[in-house]
Amino acid sequence: MSTFLSAFAHLVENLADQLQPLFHASAAAVAIVLFTALVRLLVHPLSRASARGQRARAALQPRVTELRAKHGKDREGFQKALMELHAEEKVSPLSGCLPGLLQMPAFFLLYHLFSSATIGGDANALLGHTLFGAPLGGRWAGALADGGVFGAAGLVYLGLFAVVAAVAAFTVRRTRRTSAAAAAQPAAGPGGEPVPGLASIGRLMPFLSFFTLVTVAVVPLAAALYVVTSTTWTAVERAVLYRDMPGAAPGAPALV
């Protein structure tokens, strides 16, 4: 882990050096944003595959309904037939989880990198980098102690909070626009059976996006930049990929 952190630290430092003539003291922060964009670009094919999978699952709903009617109370038979149908159509119910799971290592890597005083036995030089005066290794509590809410570092966090709140509000509005179409269909679990209360949970989930504010407040600023950039990317990406799928992709909280 230490060797990997050292290699990643050198990568960020080298990228920051290249960006320094344009962004000066904030070059490392811009390097982190670019790193986040690169991670999202690498994961984007999986996000597109997830969208295609959701379209395929939506198209299979009439056949799932037929299977449910055919097997009646034979739950085991229905589950077996459903699995065979998914295999036949090459649809994976878990495909939507992969993009988020594959981003987690990048987030934790940044978290550890900017939480460590030393890297490979040497002082962590990245902790000296700032974003408009706010240290990348600092947290919101430190910003409040050093200048308060409207100090230099405090204003940086206020800006990040504003972006997260705007993205969460966008997610909620988008989900409300699609909920009318989704309301016509019964909320169902992975096996296709209606699940009591699942529709209410679906309506609540977009509001959980606001809990990203807590993540931004407690992690190092570098990791917070990753979260804000990735969350914004997710909102825009889902709006584009699911634009013609009313009710198919309700907004969900996104840590990364």
Image (cartoon, rainbow, N blue to C red):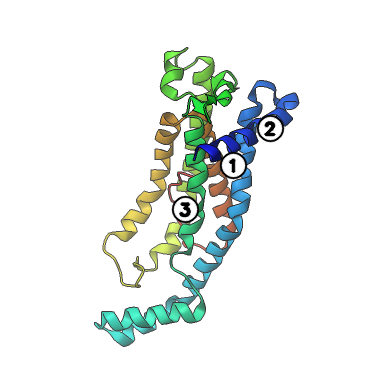
Q: Is residue 123 above or below residue 66?
A: above
Taking depth in this image into account, of 172 and 22 the one nearest to the observer is 22
Could you say whether the residue bearing mark 3 is in a helix, strand or loop? Answer: helix
Nearer mark to the viewer, of 2 and 3: 2
Q: Earlier in the sequence, mark 2 or mark 1?
A: 2
**Inter-mark Cα distance, 2 to 1:** 16 Å
Q: Amino acid at mark 3?
A: Leu
**Inter-mark Cα distance, 2 to 3:** 28 Å
Taking depth in this image into account, of 49 and 138 the one nearest to the observer is 138
Q: Which residue is mark 2?
A: 14
Residue 101's tag is: 3
In the rendered picture of this protein, how many numbered marks are placed on residues? 3
Instruction: Identify the residue shown where x is 54% and y is 38%.
Output: 3
Label 2: how many Cα within 10 Å (few below 14, some 14–19, many 20+): some
Q: Are marks 2 and 1 in contact (CB under 8 Å)?
A: no
Quadrant of the image occupied by residue 128: top right
Q: Earlier in the sequence, mark 2 or mark 3?
A: 2
Label 3: how many Cα within 10 Å (few below 14, some 14–19, many 20+): few
Instruction: Identify the residue shown where x is 57% and y is 46%.
Output: 233
Q: Position of residue 250 (x, y in %)?
A: 45, 56
Q: Amino acid at mark 1?
A: Thr
Q: Position of residue 88 (x, y in %)?
A: 49, 82
Q: Which residue is mark 1?
A: 36
Position of 250 with respect to 235 (left or right) is: left
Position of 81 with respect to 47 (left or right) is: left
**Inter-mark Cα distance, 1 to 3:** 15 Å
Nearer mark to the viewer, of 2 and 1: 2
